[in-house]
Image: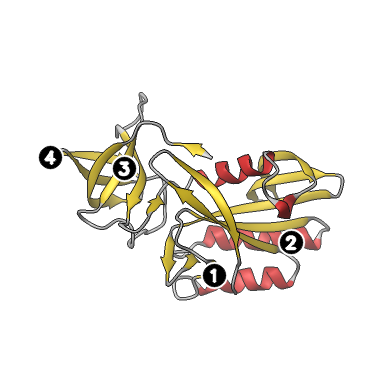
């Protein structure tokens, strides 16, 4: 799990650019850092309650990071950095049955001109893992991506190449909210990613998905859900 610490409640106003948004904190406008390059249009709605994490540093232009968005029926984590931490922790704790038997983890493993999130090692060899953050849910299905991602497509193609070379490879989708029962590629937003994913799976790349339990105290992987192609 990832503990969120002390949160500050605010109201979302609007997004200024990919990584900065404007919020209202008790009647005062403040800039916040958005650690997510996705569009998140379904989350970042004017007037919606959000929760911020205070964040300091010499070179920062904002005093807060956007942490959670209150959708009314559920909270959603907006921080795209969390899924890697959650998968890493769950693997260390032995909670991911799909990766049982791997006792070594190397983060940010570089292969060719691609950098993948993790390389797991064990008696059965090496498994390369790329983790994707999912925040968009429609009709109970988490869909990825919510905007075209040439980087995501490149990662999937790299995994396919590594599988051809004799490695095990997997894409892990982490839905940062509780209201998804499955995950699917977003062909409307990025048909090239969907085609790449399906092609990679045909070549032996594995795909897994997990949803999260999200509260104002913590975010944790709660259960595995199916990937529907």
> Which residue is the site of mark 2?
161
> Which residue is the site of mark 4?
27
Q: Nearer the viewer, mark 4 or mark 2?
A: 4
Q: Are marks 1 and 3 in contact (CB under 8 Å)?
A: no
| Upstream in sequence: badge 4 or badge 2 | 4
Q: Quadrant of residue 172?
A: bottom right
Give the x, y percent position of residue 117: 62, 47
> Residue at 72% across / 64% down in the picture?
205
- Distance between the alpha carbons at the discs numbered 2 and 1: 22 Å
In the orientation shown, which residue stands out farthest toward the top?
Answer: 58
Q: Nearer the viewer, mark 1 or mark 3?
A: 3
- Determine whether the residue tagged by mark 3 lies in a helix, strand or loop: strand
Q: Are marks 4 and 1 in contact (CB under 8 Å)?
A: no
The reply, left or right, for residue 56 in relation to residue 224 is left
> Which residue is the site of mark 1?
184
Crowdedness of circle 4 by 10 Å Cα count: few (<14), some, many (20+)? few
């Amino acid at each position: 799990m990832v503990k969120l610490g002390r949160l500050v409640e605010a109201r979302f106003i609007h997004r200024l650019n990919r990584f900065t948004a404007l919020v209202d904190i008790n009647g005062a406008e403040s800039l916040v850092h958005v650690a997510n390059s996705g569009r998140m249009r379904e989350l970042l709605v004017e007037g919606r309650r959000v929760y911020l994490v205070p964040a300091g540093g010499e070179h920062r232009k904002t005093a807060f990071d956007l942490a959670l968005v209150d959708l009314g029926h559920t909270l959603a984590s907006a921080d795209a950095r969390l899924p890697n931490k959650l998968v890493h922790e769950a693997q260390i704790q032995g909670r991911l049955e799909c990766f049982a038997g791997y006792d070594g983890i190397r983060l940010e493993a570089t292969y060719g001109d691609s950098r993948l999130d993790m390389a797991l090692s064990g008696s059965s060899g090496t498994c390369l893992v790329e983790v994707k953050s999912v925040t968009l849910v429609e009709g109970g299905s988490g869909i990825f991506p919510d905007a075209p991602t040439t980087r995501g497509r490149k990662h999937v193609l790299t995994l396919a190449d590594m599988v051809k070379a004799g490695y095990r490879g997997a894409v892990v989708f982490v839905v940062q909210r509780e209201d998804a029962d499955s995950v699917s590629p977003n062909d409307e937003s990025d048909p090239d990613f969907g085609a790449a994913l399906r092609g990679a799976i045909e070549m032996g790349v594995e795909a897994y998905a997990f949803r999260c339990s999200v509260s104002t105290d913590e975010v944790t992987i709660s259960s595995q859900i199916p990937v529907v192609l």
